[in-house]
């Protein structure tokens, strides 16, 4: 479930009256998602998503996300477009939460990931990076390398649930990642959470990219690494190099990696696995057993991290060295 804030019919009607979209025909809570409250909202003119931003999203950062979606949509990226009310504002309040309405995107997240999906995502990610190149706002990545040690320490305190050997193993990787993390690589706007549940396909084509609430300014190749972790491993934990070649090849056909990005890729992929392992571990330990949201499995990312630890060359990811500019 992800309806943390219930909204009454009259409140929705009053909210929607601020926009030139006609009256409300239906409004239904959406079960998917874990961060925010989302409603599927049908009005006399179209279907929209109404999002109430919950506690983990910092209110002062919302203008970044709203402006980014507007910018990317205006540059041809199939992402939600925020609606502006009659007063010109895209952000307003509903039931004491910040809230916005965005356009509804058609399509479905893929259940069984194929190499064709990976090709489409690689190309779309590179296009997103190019479209973000002239986006004027910046947002620090609060879940990059400098945040990982505090997250590990917060989990290590749960001695009953987290084995000391695991903490030692992660601490060793942490030292390696912290000392080797690049200071300079091409950077810009990254999605930072481009998992299959945030990508829609329709009729075999990529039709939508959603959930920009981790987007930030960081290394572009790190975003590709996040994607590779999310799209190119099988459910048994094995790495699928065919999918990785498709993902990276399609990305590089739009935006070739620099030699420095190519060289840094194994470390970036290792770090990207650490980031999702740590947030999943944190959520696993801090989500009450009675909560309706099921935390995601941290062990999946431990396996991915162990894979990256053994990688010796960027070529093992199917990255094409000839295209590394
Ligand atoms: N613009 C959109 N068009 C169509 N469906 C959408 C749109 N935005 C969200 N949804 C639907 O709502 C669900 C939840 O959205 P989202 O993933 O953004 O939730 P969240 O709680 O903010 O994020 P998270 O996935 O990080 O928990 C999606 O799985 C999708 O079904
Ligand atoms: N994509 C994240 C969840 C947060 O959106 C994960 O799989 O851990």
Image: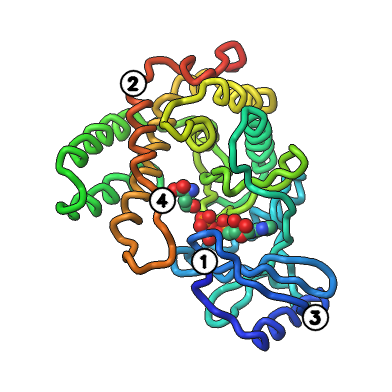
Q: Quadrant of residue 86 in the image?
A: bottom right
Task: Judge whether residue 140 can be spotted in this image.
Answer: no
Q: Which mark is residue 23?
A: 3
Q: Is residue 103 above or below residue 249?
A: below
> Which dot marks residue 313?
none
Identify residue for label 1: 2
Mark 4, other Cα within 10 Å: few <14 / some 14–19 / many ≥20: some
Q: Quadrant of residue 284?
A: bottom left
**Image x and y of residue 274, in percent:** 36, 39
Q: Which mark is residue 296?
A: 4
SS at badge 1: loop
Report, in whole angstroms, how far the alpha carbon at label 1 lies from the one at label 2: 38 Å
| Residue at the spot of label 2 | 310
Q: Residue at x 22, y 34 (%)?
A: 169
The answer to whether 21 appears left or right of 56 in the picture is right
| Alpha carbon distance from label 2 to label 3 | 58 Å
> Residue 271: image x %, image y %?
38, 35
- State the SS at label 4: loop
């Amino acid at each position: 479930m992800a309806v943390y804030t219930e909204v009454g019919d009259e409140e929705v009607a009053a909210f929607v009256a601020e926009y030139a979209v006609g009256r409300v025909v239906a409004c239904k809570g959406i079960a998917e998602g874990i961060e925010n409250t989302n409603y599927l909202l049908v009005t006399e003119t179209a279907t929209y998503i109404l999002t109430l931003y919950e506690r983990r999203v910092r209110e002062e950062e919302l203008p970044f996300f709203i402006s980014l979606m507007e910018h990317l949509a205006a540059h041809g990226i199939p992402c939600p477009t925020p609606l502006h009310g009659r007063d010109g504002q895209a952000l307003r309040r509903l039931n004491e939460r910040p809230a916005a309405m965005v356009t509804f995107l058609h399509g479905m997240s893929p259940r069984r990931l194929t190499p064709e999906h990976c090709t489409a995502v690689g190309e779309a990610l590179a296009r997103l990076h190019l479209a973000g190149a002239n986006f004027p706002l910046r947002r620090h990545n609060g879940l990059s390398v400098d945040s990982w040690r505090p997250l590990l320490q917060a989990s290590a305190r749960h001695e009953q649930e987290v084995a000391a050997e695991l903490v030692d193993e992660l601490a060793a990787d942490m030292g390696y990642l912290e000392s080797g993390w690049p200071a300079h690589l091409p950077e810009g706007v990254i999605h930072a959470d481009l998992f299959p549940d945030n990508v829609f396909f329709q009729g075999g084509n990529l039709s939508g990219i959603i959930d920009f609430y981790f987007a930030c300014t960081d290394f572009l190749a790190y975003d590709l690494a996040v994607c590779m972790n999310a799209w190119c491993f099988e459910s048994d934990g094995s790495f699928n190099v065919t999918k990785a070649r498709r993902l990276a090849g399609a990305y590089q056909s739009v935006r070739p990696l620099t030699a420095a990005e190519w060289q840094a890729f194994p470390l970036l992929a290792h770090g990207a696995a650490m980031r999702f392992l740590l947030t999943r571990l944190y959520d696993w330990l801090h989500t009450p057993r009675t909560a309706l949201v099921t935390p995601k499995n941290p062990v999946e990312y431990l396996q991915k991290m162990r894979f990256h630890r053994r990688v010796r060359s960027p070529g093992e990811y199917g990255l094409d060295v000839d295209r590394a500019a």
